Image: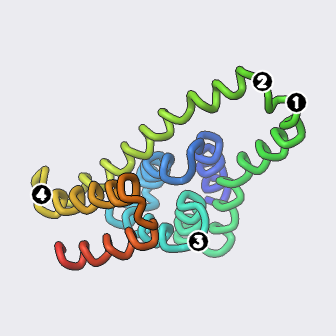
Amino acid sequence: MLWQLFIVFLKVGLVSFGGGYAVLTLIQREAEGRGWTDLGEFQEVVAMAGMAPGSIATNAATLIGYSEAGVLGAIVATVGIILPSLILVILISAFFLKLYNNDWIKSSFYGLRPIVTGLIIYAAIHFGLGGRGEAVPSWSMIGMLLICAGSIVMVTKYKVHPFAVILLSAVAGIVVF
């Protein structure tokens, strides 16, 4: 079990460009495929992982590892998911100054941005629509989208401080839902 946890989260860690939200669907697929979680349990894992400080993917790996094999499982899953990033950061930092001005490197990282954005949007849609048995679009989804759109407008057009937008969105969520 520990080896399986390590290998699964090492594999996730190898493809986790763009942060934790970009790989949530991969973690979900791996965890559900092995019977570690179902959709409802995974949504609870994501909610708890999002509330804890740090990367949501790392926190999700830790929670899944803990639920499957206790403290040792949490450690193994966490090491598995962060090890590829740690090795990559060490290797890149060794050559960073030489590679920094290379046009190919700049173009490659610039090209990854739309891919990461697409993965995050897919994860948001997948969690927003999936598994609730509601009609699409539901009233709650319309309310959520209106709050989201209002938040984006407040931050981009009116330059409202993000903390104020979070508080206003929370109040709007309480009123709407």
Per the model, the C-alpha gap separating discs 2 and 3 is 34 Å
Instruction: State which quadrant residue 147 falls in.
Output: bottom left
For label 3, count other residues whose C-alpha is less than 10 Å away and answer few (under 14), some (14-19) or many (20+): few
User: What residue is disc 4 on?
Assistant: 138
Circle 2/circle 1 CB separation < 8 Å? yes
Q: Position of residue 28 (x, y in %)?
A: 43, 52
Q: CA distance from mark 4 to mark 3?
A: 31 Å
User: Where does label 1 land, which residue?
Assistant: 98
Circle 2 sits on which residue? Answer: 102
> As rendered, which of 2 and 11 lies closer to the eye?
11
The location of residue 11, given as percent across then percent down, is: 62, 43
Q: Could you tell me which residue is drawn at 84 percent across and 43 percent down?
A: 93
Q: Which residue is mark 3?
A: 53
Q: Nearer the viewer, mark 2 or mark 3?
A: 2
Q: Residue at the spot x=54%, y=53% of the render?
A: 20
Q: Looking at the image, is mark 2 or mark 3 earlier in the sequence?
A: 3
Residue 12 sits above or below residue 162 on the image: above
Q: Secondary structure at mark 1?
A: helix
In the displayed structure, does residue 37 sit left or right of residue 77? Answer: left
* Amino acid type at mark 4: Ser
Q: Nearer the viewer, residue 57 or 32?
A: 57
* Label 1 crowd bin: few (<14), some (14–19), many (20+), radius 10 Å: few
The image shows residue 32 at horizontal and vertical percentages of 41, 53
SS label for mark 3: loop
Query: Which mark is in front, 1 or 3?
Result: 1
Neighbor class of circle 2 (other Cα within 10 Å; few <14, some 14-19, many 20+) is: few
Evaluate if marks 1 and 3 touch, with contact meaning CB atoms under 8 Å apart.
Answer: no
Whichever of callouts 4 and 3 sits on the residue coming sooner in the sequence is 3
Circles 1 and 4, Cβ within 8 Å, touching? The answer is: no
Q: Residues within 10 Å of mark 4 (few under 14, many from 20)?
A: few
Distance between mark 1 and mark 4 Cα atoms = 53 Å
